[in-house]
Every structure is written in C-alpha cells, then in structure tokens.
Image (cartoon, rainbow, N blue to C red):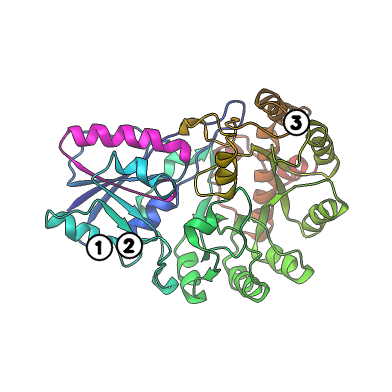
Amino acid sequence: MKFKLIYPRWEKLKGQTTFNLPPHGPVAFAATLPEDVEVSFTDENVEDIDFDETCDLVGISMMLSTQVQRGWELATRFREQGKQVVFGGIATMLHAEETALHADAIFLGEAEGRSGQVMEDWKQGSLKKVYNYMGRHPAIEEVGPARRDLYKRELYNHKGVQMVDLFHASRGCRFSCYPCAVSYLGGRVFRPRPMDKVIEELAGIENNRLFVVDNSLAQNKEWEKELFREMIPFKKKWISHTIEDDPEILDLAARAGAWYVYQAVYDTSDYIKERVKRYHDHGIGVEGTILLGLDNQTEDDIKRLVDFLLEIDLDLAEFTIMTPFPHTKGYDDFLREGRIFDFDWNHYNAGQVVFHPRHMSAERLQELYDYAWETFYRDESQESKMFRLFCNVALREMNEGTYRPRDRRLVNRSFGKEVVRKIVTN
C-alpha cells in the first residue's frame, strides 16, 4: 500500500531567524511501519503538498499546537477527495478530541509494534476511530533507527549552511516541569535506549551534526557518562538540552562533540552565572531558554533578567512566553482560574500571550517579550550570533579533519581556517 505522510506547516515568529530542521516524529513513526508499506513524506514547511499524488492512506503527523488547525485543513481537503486520514504525533495527543472530529482515525502514544495494526485494519476496511496507547509504552528495545532516507536533504539548510539531524537516545523524563507536557506524553520514567541501539543509529547517520532531542540528558549520571563515551569515536558535533552539572560529565560531553546546549535560565543567581561559565570552560556554547510570564515574575523581574543575560556571556538567547498547552499543570490552573482568554491554537506558538498574567496585563507582557528580544540582540543580531556558532563548529571540524565543504555560505566566502577563527574569536 502507498502511505502519504505529511508534516503541516506553521507560521514562524516575526523578527526571529527562520530556519527549518528535518522533523523527527514523522520519520520515527515511518520506521515502525511494515515493510510492505511504501511511504512518501512531505514537510510542508519546505515544500508544497502534491494533492494529486497517488496514495491509499494519508497520515498527518503534528508536533506543535500551532500546527493543528493547518493539519485539520489538510485532512478536510484529502477527505473531500475520498482519502482516509489518520493523525498522530505530540499535538494529536494534546488535542485528541478536536482532532478526532477531522480524522478517520487518530493514533495516540508511541508507535513501535503498533502501527502495523493500523495498516492492517485499513486493508480490511475496519479502521478504528481511536488507537489509544497512552501510558502503555512499548519496550524501549523496539525503538529502531528513524527513516532519514525520507528527507529531501537539499531543503534543509539555512543560507547554505547544513542543518542538524535529529536523534534521540532515550524517552520519558523523571522531571515534571510546570509548563511542560512531557510527563503526560512520555511518562515520568526515564527510559534509555539500549546502548547498542544508540550506536547502531549513530553509525547510520551521515550528517556530522546532530540535535540530541532527549527531554534532558541530565537524567542519570552513569548513563550520561556511558552515552558520551560511546559517542566520542563518531566525532559528531551536537546540540542538546541540559547536561548534568558535573566536571567529569562536562569533560566527556566536550570530548564527545557537545557543540552547544539549551540551558534554562530562570533567575539571576550566581549558580546560573557559574553554570554558563562551566559550559564555556569546556568549550560548550550556551543558548539560554528564558520563559516570560510566570506567576512569580513582575515587570521589574523580567527587565532585571534581560540585563543579567547580557552580563553572563550567553551565545544565544531564546525568549518564550508562558503558554498553557493542554495537559499541563499550567493549562489546568489557568483554566480553573478563568485566566485563558484565547483558544485559537494558531496563537499557541510561545510568542503570543493567550492568558492573563498575575502581575501585569497581557498587553504589557507582550511588550516585554518584544523588549527582551530587541534588547538582547541590539548589538549583534540573532542571525550573526548563530553564524558565529556555525563557524565555531566548522573550526573544530577543521582542526579534527572531519570538516566537509558542504556549507555553501562558508565555501562561497572562501573561508579558510584562520578567517573562521577570527569570526569565532572577534
């Protein structure tokens, strides 16, 4: 059978550098399908959908709340053509009841060992409305390499610089952060993949640059050490979420190719300042992730936080507005308190205020969000800082002999090692 898999587009935030990473969810799902299923994949963020393409069944994979309304629109169009549509992905799980109104079937939960049943039911003409596996996770040993062969590689670059591939070494998260839905989606139990499976997938990834998309790498110190030791021989350069604040682990991470990390900056403490310094001492860049609009923040708190970010030598900063996504404690609290005033899921993009903050108006929080971006990037643009990070990784690759001249922006400027070094250091 022919299965057409689609990743819907969403509107990017104004004023921020726009680039597209190859999505991981759809190709991870595709890897679970039976061998007799012929898959074609379209990421609508980088190419148009061919609505006339021959297929038997359409799958729509949604990660973000801001994708769901576009996903529903696509489903309506395909169903009007007589095609059946099945939805899956994180945003389908968060918006299951609404999505079911636009679908022939919705798939909830992790797909390993289960997607074959959906395909068989379709063949038998008995597709179920809901396949609900939430909270019943398959054995982590069943998670295999994603179907990266489905990507159109040439579409994933930013001004000639190749984007990273996405990869995960574990599922689940033992933390339960206030604005996060991970505990609902993947459970509170940390589930590391067997290391031989991790090595197998790493060995099959041609891209020398990765985004390790695990919710947090700071889950288990011994596992973290083992992971980084196994990654060292691959000489890949990678981005991740938080790494354990431990000298041995940071040293191993640097040797394993840690390029930069996303580190939450939630206050102006010396601990945060030293945390960033310790990353830098190990040659690891830091992109601060800063959440604005929490109930303990006043207007002065936000302004002080922005000033603090300029003092601690962050390589990048990403500001987001507290957003009450469904199935989070924030959503439950704000809904109970009557503080959510906007239920247009297109606006749930972490850049638009959809609730009444505790210490200021919604309009003022929106202004402070714009102020934070403008102030942090006043002296050097976000794009320039990003390019510096890319030059940094290119220099490391040159020093190690792993650099391949695939980045057209660097090649077209005829950058040699010394020129790249000057960009990194100036």
- Going by the image, does 1 lie left or right of 219? left
Circles 3 and 2, Cβ within 8 Å, touching? The answer is no
Q: Amino acid at mark 1?
A: Gly
Q: Which residue is mark 3?
A: 380
Q: Earlier in the sequence, mark 3 or mark 2?
A: 2
**What is the crowding at mark 2: few (fewer than 14 residues within 10 Å), some, or many (at least 20)?**
many
Q: Position of residue 121 (x, y in %)?
A: 18, 58
Q: Farthest residue to the left: give it.
A: 124
User: How would you rate the neighbour count of disc 1 (Cα within 10 Å): few for under 14, some for 14-19, many for 20 or more?
Assistant: some
Q: Residue 166, can we see it? A: yes
Marker disc for residue 32: 2
The answer to whether the residue labelled 1 contacts the one labelled 2, judged by CB atoms less than 8 Å apart, is yes
Name the amino acid, label 2: Thr
For marks 1 and 3, give the one nearer the viewer: 1
Q: Which structural element holds mark 3?
A: loop
- Which residue is painted at 79% across and 52% down in the image? 276
Asked if the stretch drawn in magenta spans residue 73, the answer is yes
N-terminal of the pair, mark 1 or mark 2, is 2
Which element is circle 1 on?
helix
Q: Of 374 and 362, which appears nearest the observer?
A: 362
Q: How far, Cα to Cα, is label 3 from label 2?
A: 44 Å
| Vertical comparison of 373 with 33: above or below | above
Where residue 232 sits: x, y (%)? 62, 69
Closer to us: 367 or 44: 367
Write the start and end of the magenta stretch as one range. Answer: 65-91
Describe residue 404's horizontal placement relative to residue 88 as left or right: right
Q: Which mark is residue 116?
A: 1
For mark 3, does the 10 Å Cα neighbourhood hold few (<14), some (14 to 19), or many (20 or more) residues? few
Q: What separation in Å lies between label 1 and label 3 (alpha carbons)?
A: 50 Å
